[in-house]
Image (cartoon, helix red, strand yellow):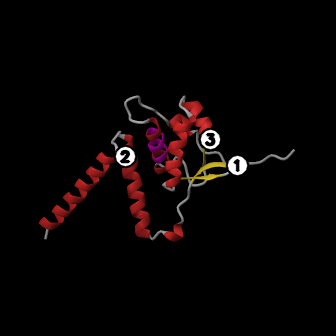
Amino acid sequence: MIRHEHRRGPDIASMFALRPAGGPIWKQIEETIRRVVAGRHLRPGDPVPSVRQLARTLSVTPNTVERAYQRLIAAGVLLSRRGRGTFVAGIAEAESSPRDHLLQDAAMRFAATASAVGAPLDEAVNELAAAYRRLDDASVLSQ
């Protein structure tokens, strides 16, 4: 009998904490997966649960999970292999300079933190812009 080895990632379904007042469920799913990937609990190539499996686990409709997955695929966070499943996408190192890599890493950490505290995207972007302005103000004052 031939046995196939399948790379198994951590049980990410256990990492979800959907909140009734936390906004749209698909967005909470998307933000949770982004946070799990940014926190390196899932690495490039790790599988994520199928749409139906995650929907059943979270007691939501498959369309809800599908919407989150499609947005994550479009953003390059996940990739789908027809007939094989959905996996965490890898970042092509050759395409990224060290500066790009540092910036992407810092952005992922910031996004994960903002998501973890429940900040919606617009609020997180506003806070980042305000921090940038404070840095500019500080550099002007020190000159």
Instruction: Name which residue type carries label 2.
Output: Thr
| Residue under label 1 | 83
Q: Position of residue 65 (x, y in %)?
A: 53, 39
Dot placed on the residue nearer the N-terminal end, 1 or 3: 3
Q: Quadrant of residue 134?
A: bottom left
Image quarter in which the C terminus is found:
bottom left
Residue type at tag 3: Ser
Q: Is residue 65 left or right of residue 2?
A: left
Q: Residue at x 39, y 35 (%)?
A: 23
The local crowd at label 2, few if under 14, some if 14 to 19, many if 20 or more residues have their Cα within 10 Å, is some
Indicate the quadrant where residue 50 lies. Answer: top right
Q: Which label lies toward us, 3 or 2?
A: 3
Instruction: Kindly identify which residue carries mark 2.
Output: 113
Closer to the eye: label 2 or 1? 1
Q: Which residues are magenta?
A: 28-34
Magenta-span inclusion, residue 31: yes
CA gap between label 3 and label 2 equals 26 Å
Q: Residue at x 55, y 58 (%)?
A: 90
The picture places residue 12, in percent across and down from the top left corner, at: 55, 39
* Horizontal side of residue 124 vs 34, given as left or right: left
Residue 77 in view: no
- As helix, strand or loop, the secondary structure at mark 3 comes to loop
Sequence order check: which comes first, mark 3 or mark 2? 3
Residue at the farthest right position: 1
Residue at (20, 63) in percent of width and height: 136
Residue on which the image places disc 3: 50
Q: Is residue 58 left or right of residue 18?
A: right
